[in-house]
Amino acid sequence: MVIRRLADIGISLLALISLLPVFAGVSAAIALTSSGPVLHRAMRVGQGGRLFTLYKFRTMVANAESLGPGITAADDNRITPIGRLLRRTKLDEFPQLINVLRGDMSLVGPRPEDPRYVALYTPEQQKVLAEKPGITSPASIRYRHEEAMLADDQWEERYIAEIMPAKLALDLEYLATRTSWTDIRVIWQTFLVLWK
């Protein structure tokens, strides 16, 4: 939809410009407290099953991908001290505005998933790939404390068997009745829960 794309471009560009001081501060904090790049680049599955590079502030040790799976548990020792703060405040997600500006993502849409987990989707769940992934969605709001839910020894199995299907069901339900007004409501709800 053209209106949605224009809104994505306008809002993400305005947010990137206004958040430049935040980007500079977070970048400096990451660079001063751990070695490695400031930005983390992760392969994710986008609209139509196309792979793209998702940008986030790095919250884990530089070689985290080689030390564990693509899902992060509550007590994951790969997370840096500053990374814990960034994850708790969701500041690590801000660079995804670049993905929105580039057209890889939208402000609202199903969260983009790691290819390893998309390979496990059922045909019904694959319908989420018809839309652009987003920074926020009803599922990302409801499961904003997902890491805390993955605190036991079987956390990856629990994610695959319980949490991932529940998130996908929420996103599919949302997409079935999605409008510009419901997108605005999701953005508003996201701001409300972030500042609680």
Image (cartoon, grey):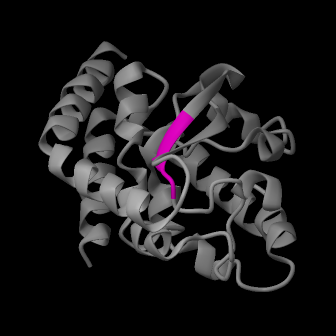
Residue 121 in view in this figure: no
Q: Please, is residue 177 above or below residue 171 in the view?
A: above
- Across and down, in percent, residue 186 comes to 33, 52
How many numbered discs sit on the rendered protein? Answer: 0
Figure quadrant of the N terminus:
top left
- Across and down, in percent, residue 173 comes to 56, 48
Relative depth, front residue between 28 and 83: 28
In the image, 85: left or right of 115?
left
Q: Residue at x 29, y 61 (%)?
A: 189
Q: Please, is residue 91 above or below residue 42 in the view?
A: below
Q: Residue at x 27, y 49 (%)?
A: 23
In the image, 187: left or right of 169?
left
- Across and down, in percent, residue 124 comes to 77, 38
Q: Main secondary structure of the magenta part?
A: strand
Q: Please, is residue 173 above or below residue 156 in the view?
A: above
76 part of magenta stretch? no
Q: Quadrant of residue 85?
A: bottom left
Q: Quadrant of residue 167?
A: bottom right
Query: What is the magenta range?
Result: 54-58
Q: Residue at x 43, y 20 (%)?
A: 103
Q: Please, is residue 13 above or below residue 134 in the view?
A: above
In the image, 19: left or right of 172?
left
- Across and down, in percent, residue 194 comes to 30, 68
Relative depth, front residue between 90 and 117: 90
Q: Residue at x 49, y 39 (%)?
A: 55
Q: Quadrant of residue 125?
A: top right
Relative depth, front residue between 123 and 13: 13
